[in-house]
Each structure stands twice: as structure tokens, then as C-alpha cells.
Image (cartoon, rainbow, N blue to C red):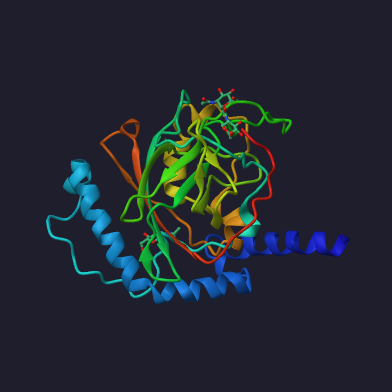
Amino acid sequence: MRFAFLSPLLAFATLVAAHPGEHHSFVRKSDELIAHELMARKCAGAIAEFENQRRVAREAKHPYLARRQTPTTTAPTPHYTTIQNSTCVTAVELTEGPYYIRNEYIRYDLRENQGGVTLVLDVGVIDTTTCRPFPNAFVELWAVNATGFYGGYSPGGNVHTDTFLRGGQFTNENGIVELTTLFPGYYTGRTSHIHAMIHKNAQRNANGTIASGSGQVNHIGQFFFDESWNDRVFSTAPYTNTREIRMYNNQDWILWQGGASAFVNTEPLGAALTDGLLGYITVAVDGSKNYRIMNTNVM
Ligand SMILES: *[C@@H]1O[C@H](CO)[C@@H](O)[C@H](O)[C@H]1NC(C)=O
Ligand SMILES: *[C@@H]1O[C@H](CO)[C@@H](O)[C@H](O)[C@H]1NC(C)=O
Ligand SMILES: *[C@@H]1O[C@H](CO)[C@@H](O)[C@H](O)[C@H]1NC(C)=O
């Protein structure tokens, strides 16, 4: 056991020292992840088309984005031949983590009264068994607030009634949902990330919550941000009030295991950070899978 514990740490230290910023490729991906990436690669054309349509729709909705693009009003022909790093094809069972809570609210805005930089997150879901957008998939998120706390968990790990930055909504007929949350802070031992779970055929409870585990869980993963966005956001209040120790993307073991493929494409929604950010990501899920939710805590 001692050896098993030591070796990842040694590998970690060596990689950080020898290859800052480019060591993702040294981490062995699981066979399951490789298989799923191959499936997703077959859908590259469909995903590119899907992302293109969403970009045009976003620019129509948020004129600030359109102004910042190179002056062209028509969408370019899809040109991606490989899955982009904004497409999340992460491994699954490794990443639920200890902080899920079942039966959270079905809603578009997860912010409640928390302070921080607003993040409008456009999530597109593609089913790699069909290469088609996935309508009526419940996209559920959970993340820490600006100073590194999960809603519903006390620092000691006890569950309580806070629900901030948790919950989700169903994708529309085009496989897309836009959720409003905050750019997450971080906590000691992890880089900034947002957890995501995608449910198929999930049932709604009468009180407006999702019945976790009532359908099939097709995906459990995590979204990350380019370090330059982390730097910008974390230099502002209230993120600067944190007592957590920052970890960077290139130090986060779980990010490496995910194949470093789950980065949110992030753009400003205005001239100031306080205007908020728009993030977009495509999640390629295997609609035939049904992952088990490990956590038994209920809201
Ligand atoms: C993702 O791809 C974009 C465009 O190719 C690039 O600018 C960005 O640095 C990449 N991000 C990561 C974390 O690799
Ligand atoms: C984050 O949550 C903790 C625990 O509820 C709270 O004490 C703290 O004020 C919150 N931080 C922000 C920036 O809202
Ligand atoms: C909502 O309803 C479900 C199912 O009846 C129940 O388990 C849960 O405790 C309820 N949640 C709230 C916040 O009332």
C-alpha cells in the first residue's frame, strides 16, 4: 500500500518539475476514456456544426460577443476535424467526488445570494451513440462559491440546507441549456472546477426538484477553465477573501485523469469582469451508459 500511495506522488513531482504546462499527455488515460474519445471523434463533424449554430445564436443574444468577433455575420463552414478541447469527453466514475447532493432544484439560475463573477454557461449535449444533439437531458451542476465552499456542506463535511450553486435544467429540443452560475473559486487540493452530471429520463418531483437516480446517469464529469481566466477572476474580490490554497490546472491530478479535454470556452460579456462571462462547452455523452451515483446525501 505504501508503494501504491507513493508512486503517484513521485510521478506528480517529476512531471510538475520537468514539464510545466504540457504534461497532460504523460498521464495514462483509462481504456474506457480512450474508447469514448474514439466514439466522440466519429461525431466531430456533427459536433462542429452543433457548436457553430450555437455560436451564431449566442452572438444574436449577446451583441457584445458579436462586436468582438472578426467582422463576419455569417457562420463559417465547420472546419474541425478533431474534437476541440471545449468538448468534454471526460472519464466518469472517477469524478463524482464527495460533494454531490441528490434531489436539488430544477432551475436556470443557481447563484442565490452568493457573490462573485456571473458565469452564463451554455452547455450543449451530444449523444455519441447517434452523433445527434440530446434533447430533454437534465444537466446538473455543482461547484464551490468564490471563497471555496460547497453549498450544503459545512467545512467538517456535514450536510445542511444551503443549495447555492447546485441544480440544473433540461436541455431544449436542440440539446442545449443555458445555466447561470458563478465562476467557481477553488479549495485546497483542487484547481477551479464545476461538476456536471447528465441524466436521461430523469423524473421531476412535485416540489420542483429532480429525482436523482430515477433515470439513467449518462455522464459524470468536471469542467475546467484556462488558467488565464482563473488568474483574472481570482485577483478580484470576493475571490481574494479566500483562505484556501490555490492549486493550478497543471497540478491537479483529477484534471489530468480527465484527459484535459473539459475546458470551458470563456468570453467576456462586457468590458468589465463584473458584466459577467459567457462559457460554452459541449458534453459528448454515451447515451447507453448508466452510471451509479455514489453519494446518498439528499437535499
Ligand atoms: C483550447 O483550445 C483553444 C483554441 O485552440 C486554445 O486557445 C486554448 O489555449 C486551449 N486550452 C487548453 C486548456 O488547452
Ligand atoms: C461561501 O460560503 C460560505 C459558507 O456558506 C460563506 O461563509 C461565504 O461567505 C461564502 N462566500 C461568498 C463570497 O459568498
Ligand atoms: C421534494 O420532494 C422529494 C420527493 O418527494 C423529497 O424527497 C424532497 O425531500 C423534497 N424536497 C424539498 C426541498 O422539499
Q: Residue at x 65, y 31 (%)?
A: 153
Whole-percent x and y of residue 105?
50, 34
Figure quadrant of the C terminus:
top right
Across and down, in percent, residue 269 comes to: 28, 39
Q: Is residue 192 above or below residue 276?
A: below
Rendered residue at 61%/62% (across/down): 257
Q: Is residue 153 visible?
A: yes
The quadrant of the rendered image in which ligand 1 is seen is bottom left
Residue at the farthest front position: 206
Taking depth in this image into account, of 143 and 174 the one nearest to the observer is: 174
Q: Percent from the top left, x then y, of residue 134?
A: 39, 59
- Point out residue 95 in the picture as x, y percentages from the top left corner: 62, 54
Horizontal side of residue 13 vs 125, given as left or right: right
* In the image: residue 275, left or right of residue 17: left
* Quarter that holds the N terminus: bottom right
In the orientation shown, which residue stands out farthest toward the right? 1
Q: Residue at x 78, y 64 (%)?
A: 7
